[in-house]
Amino acid sequence: MPRFFLPRPSPLPALAQEQSASLNEPLEKIRVDSGLPALAAAVAKQEEIVAVGAVGARAIGSNEKVTVNDRFHLGSDTKALTATLAGMLVDDGKLRWTSTIGDVLGADVPGMSRRLAAVTLEQLLSHSGGISPDTQEIGRLYYGSDNFQYNMDALRLRIIRAVKAHALRTPPGLAFHYANLGYLIAGAMIEKAAEAPWEALIANRLYAPMKLATAGLGPQATTGKLDAAVGHNLVNGKITPMPWGPAADVPPAIGPAGSAHMSVLDFARWASWNASNGKRGPALVKPETLAEIHRPRISTGKLPNARPGTPQEGEYALGWGLIKFDWTEKPVLTHNGSNTMNLAKILVDKHKDVGVTVMTNIAGKQAEEALLSLQETLYRKYA
């Protein structure tokens, strides 16, 4: 699987953490009560990280303890990163939010249905293009036995060709359908416009300028090592660490939808950059472009049985949900991310310039409830 690690930079001056409050004691109680292998959280407020902590083990049965620099999986929180890459290409004049799949990929996907060809980049990134959520048929394409014969950009086009006649569940613009396939297609459009693989673009144009030293793609741990908080799955009724290999993450072809990882500190830096409307630098996109990324496009409706990592209510922008919680004054940017073995939540309040990130290396109902409660507690205390 593609992995991109960058040299560790000097600390970001705008997000000093020397005086950060330690969250380890309350995190440990939550971790034990909820049966989580590891738990990490950080709060960024204005120009500094004001609280951070990481507790527990990198893997059940291991003596390797997590630290605040451990890589945790982001799952679908990757979608906001992909939307930001798209915004860069909009600023470059290589894409428009209204660019259609047919405009960009028509020559590479001959015979595409007219309805699919008419779906715009904006609709793909807001899950409003009518693209079907993952089905068994789509899943078989992600896990195809011959997928290892192709580079990721070629494989994404191959998958699009396979669904070119029946990728839509509803006509574009009518309904919200949370679709990883839509982000795969958006990733292919980004690759075509930039003439570079999505994996290289996210490493070079986003991770590097933001100095996210722990950020990468694919399984969190280096193969053969327990050097990160690894995910856990239920295997034959037993919670089992999934440290390496294809079983440790989503198929790499859907990387644009959910294969990023980074430490809770770097995740908080990403949250803070969005909370400041990008004003603290780096200038990844124009302010008006970031405002477009954050602007809601469609109501998600109430989704009480939403899968881990997917929104349950509110509105959806481009890679971000907007929700008015009972405990926030106004709607805030938020997202959940899970590859079914990890869970990460991010909250961004642009009005208060606050970002809250919480992460664990297991998924499921208990993890979801624990992280949501922790997110609320930290927001109430620091915002």
Image (cartoon, rainbow, N blue to C red):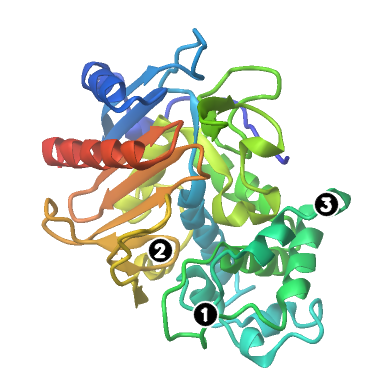
**Residue type highlighted by circle 3:** Ser
- Indicate the position of residue 65 as horizontal and vertical percent values: 45, 12
Q: Secondary structure at mark 1?
A: loop
Question: Could you say where residue 281 lies in the image, as x and y percent from the top left?
Answer: 41, 47
Is residue 220 placed above or below 111 in the rendered structure? Answer: above
Instruction: Give above or below for 35 relative to 347.
Output: above
Tell me: 279 left or right of 212: left
| Screen quadrant of the C terminus | top left
Asked whether disc 3 touches disc 2, contact meaning CB atoms under 8 Å apart, the reply is no
The x and y percentages for residue 46 are 24, 41
For disc 3, the marked residue is: 145
Kind of residue at badge 2 = Leu
**N-terminal of the two: label 2 or label 1?**
1
Task: State the residue position of label 1.
Answer: 130
Looking at the image, the residue that sits furthest to the front is 236
- Give me the C-alpha separation between circle 3 and circle 2: 39 Å
Q: Residue at x 45, y 85 (%)?
A: 173
Q: CA distance from mark 2 to mark 1?
A: 24 Å
Circle 2: is it few (<14), some (14-19), or many (20+) Cα within 10 Å?
some
The kind of secondary structure element at disc 3 is loop
Report which quarter residue 312 is drawn in: bottom left
